[in-house]
Amino acid sequence: MESTKETGCQAAPEGPILCINNCGFWGSAATMNMCSKCHKEMISKQENAKLAASSFDDIINGGSGSDAGKDVVVADAIKAQPAAPVELNVVPVQARADDSSSSQVTEPKPKVGPSRCFTCRKRVGLTGFNCKCGDLFCSAHRYSDKHDCPFDYRTAGRDAIAKANPVIKAEKLDKI
């Protein structure tokens, strides 16, 4: 211990160090005597402050805001500016209710009736089946032969097969 007094250096503490934010976790010298969570929060707050200052610089000056020196100057300028008085218009509650009803013209929405089967007009609700012809049907009329579907399944099937299996022609080989 006497050698540290003579040289003026402090000896490293022998035990673990608690976080300086008093969160109860252990800190380290690499994270400025903070736990990892507090250190990450501090870094994110610093980054957010830099982003806010640079975006403020972009709004005020129209500059790029990429210079670190500008961020400090803008932050100092913000602190130095006096606050402008703000005028508030106080409107009574009754007057606001009257103004909103007269200024907003709402058109009544057309009623959307319950979904019904296209053939038998039975209510189907959530259990209705959409056909490829574009209509909605109940469980009894969901098949194409039960509701005289105008959709051409045969041509649609041929087109799907033709797309999935393109014709490949090889060039003829030159004879030697």
Image (cartoon, rainbow, N blue to C red):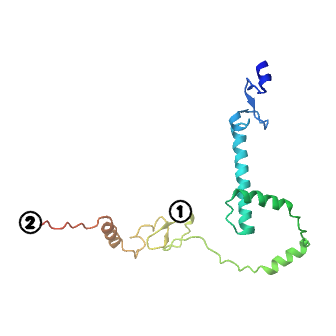
User: Pointer 2: what residue?
Assistant: 175
Q: Indicate the quadrant containing the C terminus: top left, top right, bottom left or bottom right.
A: bottom left
Residue 75 image point, x, y percent = 79, 58
Residue 75 appearing in the image: yes
Crowd tier of the residue under label 1, counting other residues whose Cα lies within 10 Å: few below 14, some 14–19, many 20 or above: few
Q: Position of residue 115 (x, y in %)?
A: 57, 70
Report the residue that reaches farthest toward the top: 2
Q: Is residue 144 left or right of residue 54?
A: left
Q: Nearer the viewer, residue 153 or 61?
A: 61
How many numbered badges does the structure rendering display? 2
Residue 122, placed above or below residue 21: below
Callouts 1 and 2 close, C-beta under 8 Å: no
Label 2: element kind: loop
Where residue 97 sits, quadrant-wise, is: bottom right
Looking at the rendered structure, the kind of residue marked 2 is Lys
Q: Residue at x 61, y 73 (%)?
A: 113
Q: Which mark is residue 127?
A: 1
Q: Is 125 rendered above or below residue 41?
A: below
Q: Position of residue 64 (x, y in %)?
A: 67, 64
Residue found 74% across the figure and 29% down from its top:
17
Type of amino acid under label 1: Thr
Inspect this view and state whether residue 1 appears. no
Residue at 71 percent across and 41 percent down: it is 39
Extreme-front residue of the structure: 6
Left or right: residue 65 versus residue 96 is left
Q: Label 1: state its secondary structure.
A: helix
